[in-house]
Amino acid sequence: MPSRKAALIQGCLLFLAVSIAFWAGCSPGKNASGKTSSTISRPKGSPLAGAVTPPGTSAGSQTTAGSQLDDSATCSVSNQPSTAGGGGSYALIYDGPVAATGATAAIASVAAQAGLPVKYVVNIQDLPALLPAAKVFIIGGTEDDLSPLVAAFTPKITAALKNYLQNGGRYLGICGGGYIASTGWEEYGQSFTSLGIIPARSGSFTGGEADPRILPVSWLGQTRQMYYQDGPVFYLMPTAEQTRIIACYADGRVAAFISSYGRGRVAVSGTHPEATPSWIYGAANGGAWTSSVPLAVDLLQELLR
């Protein structure tokens, strides 16, 4: 993503920051994940993190099939449940080199609370063989450098995932998993393309400031104090798919939403509703945090309907 020289400089700076502040991008930090960050490849200082949105879109409104979003609209969430169903039997969770261990364990706990057995995929090359029996595929919190994971999604594997979703599969992306699901982002004046399984581009809500913090989020109309670490804000685009906004940041931009994808569905969140108490150490405003795990369970169950 950034140049090799810039990535090396950023990597050195990030190593120093990890040693001092114990943070690791979209992961819950070194204490929770047992990993440290590598080269930053999610949007740092991206123009998408500011007021710029794709033409004809709004970062804070609900859209339905074929709608044109109103730039003047405010964030509007829907409490109406879906009636769609899905197949498969287990939650398939990415636990490869880019995954943050603490985040993987947390989202696996959410899946168990939602009544799903858990299976892990370490090598994305194995994804096409595992998807047919999966109820949902999940990518949770990640390390900073998403480029190895993006590269692992070859055209063949991406096509297998999209076919799975088209035929009724489910995908849940938390933080790094949300970036991966988006159509892409901008960084240092360059545009980067991702999976495009949601009708939205992404950008860092904090403009690339990766220090962990607790942020107020309006989740289904109720303000919750949630763990956040350089997660995405979503800029919805006009689409024929059905979308349902779940949560918004304090400034009204979209923090979480669910979208159809053919017969399947995708849910993404820029914040970490699955966060556990061990993540909060060192987070700014940590005393304000309250557990949102039940919301994470509800989100997954809603996705599976």
Image: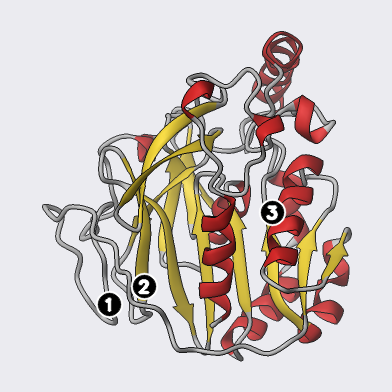
Tell me what residue is drawn at x 72 percent, y 45 percent: 103
Report x, y in % for residue 7.
68, 25
Q: Is residue 230 left or right of residue 63?
A: right
Q: Quadrant of residue 244?
A: bottom left
Marks 3 and 2 sit apart, C-alpha to C-alpha, by 24 Å
Callouts 3 and 1 close, C-beta under 8 Å: no
Viewer-closest of 15 and 170: 170
Callouts 1 and 2 close, C-beta under 8 Å: yes
Residue found at the very far left of the displayed protein: 72
The relative height of residue 89 versus residue 270 in the rendered view (above or below) is: below
What label does residue 150 carry, if any?
3
Q: Is residue 94 visible in the rendered structure shown here?
A: yes
Q: Is residue 133 left or right of residue 302?
A: right
Viewer-closest of 169 and 186: 169
Marks 3 and 1 sit apart, C-alpha to C-alpha, by 29 Å
Q: Is residue 196 visible in the rendered structure shown here?
A: no
Front label number (3 vs 1): 1
The relative height of residue 28 versus residue 265 in the rendered view (above or below) is: above
Tell me what residue is drawn at x 86 percent, y 64 percent: 121
At numbered mark 3, what does the secondary structure look like: helix, strand or loop? helix
Q: Which residue is mark 1?
A: 64
Q: Is residue 136 left or right of residue 43?
A: right
Question: Type of residue at label 2?
Answer: Thr
Report x, y in % for residue 65.
29, 82
Tell me what residue is drawn at x 51 percent, y 57 percent: 295
How many marks are shown on the rendered structure?
A: 3
Q: Which residue is mark 2?
A: 243
The relative height of residue 55 versus residue 19 in the rendered view (above or below) is: below
Q: Residues within 10 Å of mark 2 (few under 14, many from 20)?
A: many
At numbered mark 2, what does the secondary structure look like: helix, strand or loop? strand
Marks 1 and 2 sit apart, C-alpha to C-alpha, by 6 Å
